[in-house]
Image (tube, rainbow, N blue to C red):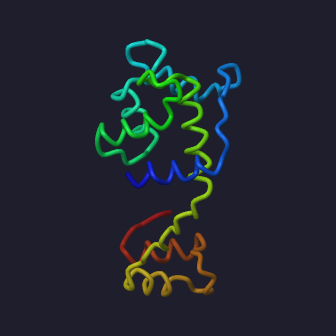
């Protein structure tokens, strides 16, 4: 439901524009064809639901998918055409691009591993040279010649 509201808000800020089928991105067209399971030339609710899930969207129910369908079904036939799907994908891309990038948490290193690394990093560069690595492995009883 949150996604639907955000897409509606994004769409409200833009004038409606039909995407002629001739100018649909080939990748969007290929995705549409992939999810048009019955090869009808339209996506039904279940086909759209599968497409949205594949695109990584958190659609929880067919009712939520139906809301998205209703928003983009400009001709009211209760199916999604390629043009309607292309508009949905275009707005999803714009929405995702407008979101701040998620911060990737810094990996945590066990303090014992850090201490062991520091012990063998003789020149304190933060990197182990081949010689330093050989010394570390030798200390562990591994013979790497």
**Which quadrant of the structure image shows residue 40?**
top left
Q: Is residue 22 above or below residue 1?
A: above
- In percent of width and height, residue 9 lies at 54, 53
Percent position of residue 88, x then y = 54, 37
Quadrant in the rendering for residue 108: bottom left
The answer to whether residue 9 is left or right of residue 22 is left
Q: Residue at x 37, y 75 (%)?
A: 140
In the image: residue 74, left or right of residue 140: right
Between 30 and 118, which is closer to the camera in this rendering? 30
Residue 38 drawn above or below residue 70:
above
Q: Is residue 61 left or right of residue 136?
A: left
Please provide percent x and percent y for residue 142: 39, 68
Q: What is the total number of numbered labels drawn onto the structure image? A: 0
Identify the residue at horizontal 46%, vertical 52% (top origin): 5
- Residue 75's place in the image compared with 106, above or below, is above
Observer-nearest residue: 17 or 20?
A: 17
Residue at 34% in and 42% down:
64
Residue ranking furthest to the front: 76
């Amino acid at each position: 439901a949150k996604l639907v509201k955000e897409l509606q808000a994004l769409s409200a800020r833009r004038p409606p524009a039909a995407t002629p089928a001739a100018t649909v991105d080939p990748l969007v067209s290929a995705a549409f064809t992939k999810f048009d399971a019955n090869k009808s030339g339209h996506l039904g609710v279940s086909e759209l639901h599968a497409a949205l899930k594949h695109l990584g969207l958190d659609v929880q129910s067919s009712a939520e998918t139906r809301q998205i369908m209703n928003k983009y079904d400009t001709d009211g036939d209760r199916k999604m055409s390629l043009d309607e799907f292309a508009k949905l994908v275009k707005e999803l891309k714009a929405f995702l691009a407008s979101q701040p990038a998620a911060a990737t948490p810094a990996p945590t290193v066990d303090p014992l591993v850090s201490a062991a690394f520091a012990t063998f990093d003789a020149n304190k560069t933060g990197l182990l040279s081949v010689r330093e690595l050989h010394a570390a492995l030798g200390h562990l009883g591994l013979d790497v010649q």
